[in-house]
Image (cartoon, rainbow, N blue to C red):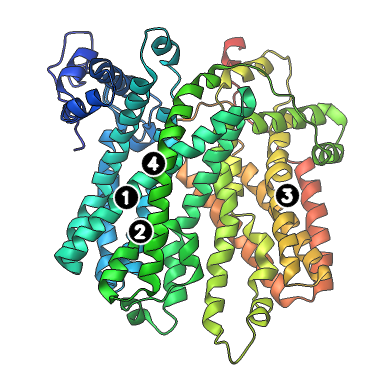
Amino acid sequence: MMNLFKKKNELDDGSTPNEPAPDTPDELLSNSRWLKFFDLFKGFLTRVGVDYPQFRLIVGYKLYMDAIDPNFMSTLDNGRRRAGKNAFFRGLWVYALVSLFLIMFLSMAPSNAIMGLGTVMIFYTFMYMTVLVQAFSGSLLDVRDVGILETRGVSEKTRSAAQTAHILVYVLSLFIAMMTVPIVASFFFLGIAGGIVFLLSALVLMLVNYVVSIGLYAIVLHFFHGERLKNILSMIQIFIIVLSVFMYQMPSIMTQLAGRSGLANLNRPMPFAWYMGLVYPLWFTGPNAWLQNQQFNAGGILTILMLVAVVGSYFIYGPAMRRLTNNLSKLNESGEEPVHSWVFFRAMRHLVPQDKDQRTFFTLSWRMMQADGDYKMRVYPQMAMAFVMIIIFLVPSFNNYSGKQTNWLETMQHNFVWSVAPLFATIGIVTAVYFLRFSKNPSAMKLFATIPAFDKSILYREAIRTVFVRLTAPLIILVGILTLIFLPPWKVLANILVGLGLGLLITVINGSLMKNTAPYSTVFQAGQVNTGVTFGGMMIAIAVAAAGGFAIVFLPWWLTLIAGVIILVGSWFLLNHSYSHVNFTLPGESDFE
């Protein structure tokens, strides 16, 4: 399954003896197992109006272009890909390895279909969403052949069918790699009937995930154009990653919600709970739960939700796919979206010292961070982990609530998590500082290498300042404002100030650890992440945040307020006088030596 392209003998084309030559389009069209799989449906596709020779040629060349694209799913093989070999297929062993881990959940709760099978469904959906951003989105939004197909008389139906088949290659590959082992194990733990039902439910979940992704992109392509369209698509991909991170934590949350009296209780039927309706992969455990318990309760409700999703997908898919195919050309539209100077940006800019053009470089760093979609997709999900961590720490509070002894709101109000919540917003600072070094167009930084006696410290300082001002500070303030529901205003103000002060201190410290690399000077490639530096920065961040957490919990609010002001002002002063002797090399600087 993982080697879908047939190997060929090496050609004498100047390549090294140990490096296999890439597959040619003709070989792929002849030997691709996926194209042979689609050949089985040649009669059906022809009857529904698809020009099958054109369909096969389009799908084959799409797969070939994926194989030769060095950026396509390069993270799966750590950047060390073989020429002409599809990185996605070569990386499927990772998902197969994850599927072995999922068997543990089935063995822990064989009598609890919602818990055991639900965890498998959630992990599969998590992986699907992650790969959706990395691979499926690039394939769904592939505009390389739009102009060619439109001028070659290819019908809309054939184009849509080829687009669908192209994506299904990856959707089915991921499904087989990740779900084969759990499905086989389900026959052992749940019996033949349970295994068959789980197989069908998993297949339906795969199709619903696919239709939902197509529908989402089709809606966006219909309503937006130009640069705004590209920005909206980037926001959707960031949201998908954040949602997938939350779903990744759902098994842990479910365990704590359901296992108040111990782990043994997880191996028994669960009643329907409100969170099951919010996490849609759980809907597809309904038929198995119904089969196990012979009672409507949770299994019946979830089954109804699953059927609604399936029926909705059936009616959504056709129009959505047609709109998606017809509107792909919008991605080729050019046009600059006006840059807005929001009140927050103007206010923060006035806090930057005026000397040595620091405000100019602060504006430059702000705009570059604002326009870099890759930076957002790598950093924003880490920043959003603050909300996930707050939820994880709040879940044990449910264990202290019985409904008789205490009021739920009172229990939540006395939870220490609300006091330290702003500190959770510092969790993504290390990642945000580290990824400052990457850019889509690092050659643009060569401009500064041409300036005589250019002060690199200003460029680096303002890039670090932007991380705090643009990302960390707003998140800390937002989390603090949300805690007003449970804490008095003066306590919230004190907590926010401590969070801002410690967040800025963590930013400055991590900037010092990583000051040997110029900002925006490197093209990102998998395998470049310095885990030693990021691990050290993370340990320091955890230590600083933990110290602040103890202070917030045990000190009176007024003393916390004073400490917060002192730390914030001191850290801002420290930032203004840091990085005076950075020693990184700008792109192109060696050319002028």
Q: Is residue 481 above or below residue 26?
A: below
Give the residue at mark 1.
204
Q: Is residue 468 above or below residue 43?
A: below
Which kind of residue does numbered mark 3 sit on?
A: Pro
Q: Secondary structure at mark 3?
A: helix
Which kind of residue does numbered mark 2 sit on?
A: Phe
Q: Looking at the picture, how far across and down is residue 411, in whole percent?
A: 64, 81
Q: Looking at the picture, how far across and down is residue 320, in whole percent?
A: 46, 34
The residue located at (35%, 68%) in the rendering is 114
Residue at mark 1 to residue at mark 3: CA–CA distance: 41 Å
Q: Looking at the picture, how far across and down is residue 92, in whole percent?
A: 27, 41
Question: Of callouts 2 and 3, which one flags the residue occurring earlier in the amino acid sequence?
Answer: 2
Residue at mark 1 to residue at mark 2: CA–CA distance: 8 Å
Residues marked 1 and 2 touching at CB (< 8 Å): yes
Residue 558 visible in the picture: yes
Give the residue at mark 3.
474
> What's the mark number on residue 428?
none
> What's the mark number on residue 284?
2
Residues marked 1 and 3 touching at CB (< 8 Å): no
Residue at mark 2 to residue at mark 3: CA–CA distance: 38 Å
The residue located at (43%, 47%) in the rendering is 312
Query: Pointer 3: residues within 10 angstroms few (<14), some, or many (20+)?
Result: some
The picture quadrant where one finds residue 100 is: bottom left
Query: Pointer 1: residues within 10 angstroms few (<14), some, or many (20+)?
Result: some
Residues marked 3 and 4 touching at CB (< 8 Å): no
Select label 3 or label 4 by which is in front. Answer: 4
Q: Secondary structure at mark 1?
A: helix
If the image is split into quadrants, where does the C terminus sit? top right
The picture quadrant where one finds residue 468 is: top right
Residue at mark 1 to residue at mark 4: CA–CA distance: 10 Å
Q: Secondary structure at mark 2?
A: helix
The residue located at (47%, 41%) in the rendering is 530
